[in-house]
Image: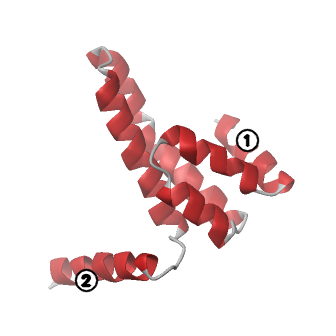
Amino acid sequence: MRRTTFAFLLLFTACKQRQGQAPSCNAMAASVVKNARTEIAAAKLPANDAHMATDQLSPLGDALASACDRDEWSAHVRTCVGTAATVAAATQCQSKLTDAQRQALAKSSTTP
C-alpha cells in the first residue's frame, strides 16, 4: 500500500507540473541533482573524483531545496531551475532571484 501511495504522489506531482504548475523546491532540487549525476557520469572522471563529486550531490540538493523554501523562491525561478537541461543552465536561473535571495544562496553554499 505504501509503495502505491508513493507512486500515486509522484504521478500526481508530475501531472501538476505538466499543467503549468511550478515544481516544488524539493522537485526542483532533485532535477538539479539528477542532471549533475548525469554530467558527472558523462565526464568519465577517475573513480575517486567521481565518487567525491557524487557524494556532494545529496547535500547540494538539500541546501538548494532549503534555500528555495526559506527564501520563498518564485514559481518562475523554480520552473527555470527545475526544467533546466544542464547544471549550467540551472545556474543561469540565479539571475532571476532577488539580490537578497542570491546573497543568501551564496552564503549557504559557502557555510560549512
Crowding at mark 2 (Cα within 10 Å: few <14, some 14-19, many 20+): few
Q: Is residue 60 above or below residue 112?
A: below
Q: Is residue 105 above or below residue 47?
A: below
- Residue at 40% from the left image edge and 44% from the top image edge: 35
Q: Nearer the viewer, residue 97 or 71?
A: 97
Q: Nearer the viewer, residue 20 or 35?
A: 20
Quarter of the image for residue 11 reads bottom left
Crowding at mark 1 (Cα within 10 Å: few <14, some 14-19, many 20+): few
Q: Report the number of discs.
A: 2
* Residue placed under numbered mark 2 in the picture: 8
Across and down, in percent, residue 41 comes to 29, 30
- Residue at 25% from the left image edge and 83% from the top image edge: 8
Quarter of the image where the N terminus is located: bottom left
Left or right: residue 16 versus residue 74 is: left
Left or right: residue 85 versus residue 14 is: right
Q: Secondary structure at mark 1?
A: helix
Which amino acid type is shown beneath numbered disc 1? Ala
Left or right: residue 4 versus residue 80 is: left
Which amino acid type is shown beneath numbered disc 2? Phe
Marker disc for residue 87: none
Q: Are marks 2 and 1 in contact (CB under 8 Å)?
A: no
Quarter of the image where the C terminus is located: top right
- Residue at 27% from the left image edge and 18% from the top image edge: 47
Q: Nearer the viewer, residue 67 or 99?
A: 99
* Residue placed under numbered mark 1 in the picture: 106
Across and down, in percent, residue 72 comes to 70, 69
